Image (tube, rainbow, N blue to C red):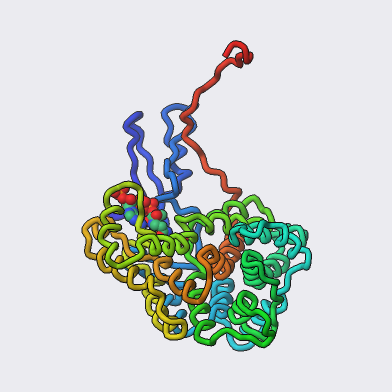
Amino acid sequence: MAKDSLSVTDNRTGKQYEMPIENGCVKAIDFRKIKTSDQDFGLMSYDPAFLNTANCKSAITFIDGDAGILEYRGYPIDQLAEKSTHLEVSYLVMNGELPNKAQLEEFTTKITHHTYVHENIKSFMDGFRYDAHPMSMLASTVAGLSSFYPEAKNVKNREVRRAQMMRLIAKMPTLAAFSYRHSQGLPYVYPNNDLGYTENFLTMVKSIGKPNWRPHPALVKALDLLFILHADHEQNCSTTATRVVGSSEVDPYSAVAAGITALYGPLHGGANEAVLRMLREIGDVKNVPEFITRVKGGDGTKLMGFGHRVYKNYDPRAKVIKKACEEVFEVTGKNPALEIAVELERIALQDEYFVKRKLYPNVDFYSGLIYEAMGFSADFFTNLFAIPRTVGWVSQWEEMITDDEQKIARPRQVFTGKRKRDYLPIDKR
Ligand code: CMC
């Protein structure tokens, strides 16, 4: 009869073990009882980069990478992208259910109430060099927020926790906008609490000299849609960083700052910036075949915006963004790099190298084109990813903090270095 368990024979000792299988997993700690002697530490699993290790149970985001499915709390991403708003999705991600009208109003009011940052934050910003990368500024100022809210250390108190989560979601656009203004040498624009989340952000970034200036509604809608697509993505690198750092029970500002620094990297959120630089380097549609040959040649050149650890199919977010490109370009005019991107995708999707490795466009392949058309410089793209991902980070952080099965994260290692040696005085070495 079928049993939900795994039988293992240790060929070193001939001993047999049975391990329960739950949710398609065996517990790595169950391997520990497999020993060659009483002194033996026990068997471990070796899994660099967590290729096959579940680090938590989570009820927030579901991905089926082979089928190209992404759902937040059970709602398919394409439905949310078409019908919802980023703040409504944020409520959903944080609380598990879509809000009713009163709940959404209350949530929106609370977020709006927290958009301002302490005036001293501006002094931090001013301390950065004129050409400081906005992601570096964002990570540092978010970490700095922890010094303004010392009560945030009380991570076991739900009320305190929720207040910081709301603050982080509310302040992230303000900090991102300030970092942009600094890098452009422009004065900071304070939040306007009469405006919606995304409109307020665009106004803080773009307005100059005209207090009543407002961004084009089509661009507000497109950016809000991009925010929805980026709200959460289960256990990616930055979310794992947030969870791991947060598992020490440090305050959420410090944990989220770790998430931001992880997102900064070109293999993660920094890929949208890298895509734009790649498209610029290619320069013309006629150079696409030569570039593809270079990628396949193994000199380390990657087709940025392609491939994903989890998706082995078209990233469902990339599909929505490709469509949104058209709506944005109607307002902004076509981004000339679009033609190069479309040609890269066309060739890659029929080339054996990419087909065999199941490399498809990911969320970053087209998002940079929209951001650039909206007038953002490439070094700001990752900030545009960090703003919406904040709700994912804080929700995953809270899920971890309230999970009785979690402890401080502390992986094991396979030691490959030298063992006990006697110290030699410097003149004897
Ligand atoms: N261009 C060319 N070859 C690639 C690419 C690419 N973009 N991505 C993977 N490969 C090759 C890789 O060289 C390897 O080939 P081989 O089997 O011959 O050694 C094979 O495909 C498997 O790749 P991998 O590096 O083992 O896959 P991974 O799961 O470790 O990496 C990835 C995933 C996203 C880091 C990688 O695909 C990549 O570097 N992509 C480009 C950067 C990018 O677009 N990142 C954004 C990810 S989506 C947004 C986010 O989550 O932040």
Residue at screen point 73% across, 66% down: 160
Quadrant observed for ligand 1 in the rendered image: bottom left
Q: Quadrant of the image for the N terminus?
A: bottom left
Frontmost residue, 410 versus 298: 298
Q: Is residue 392 visible?
A: no
Q: Is residue 239 above or below residue 103?
A: above
Residue at screen point 29% across, 63% down: 288
Most extreme residue toward the top is: 428
Q: From the viewer's perspective, is 48 left or right of 87?
A: left
Q: Is residue 377 visible?
A: yes
Q: From the viewer's perspective, is 101 left or right of 51?
A: right
Q: Position of residue 354 (x, y in %)?
A: 27, 58
Residue at screen point 55% across, 19% down: 420
Q: Quadrant of residue 339?
A: bottom left
Q: Position of residue 284 (x, y in %)?
A: 32, 66
Q: Position of residue 113 (x, y in %)?
A: 72, 78
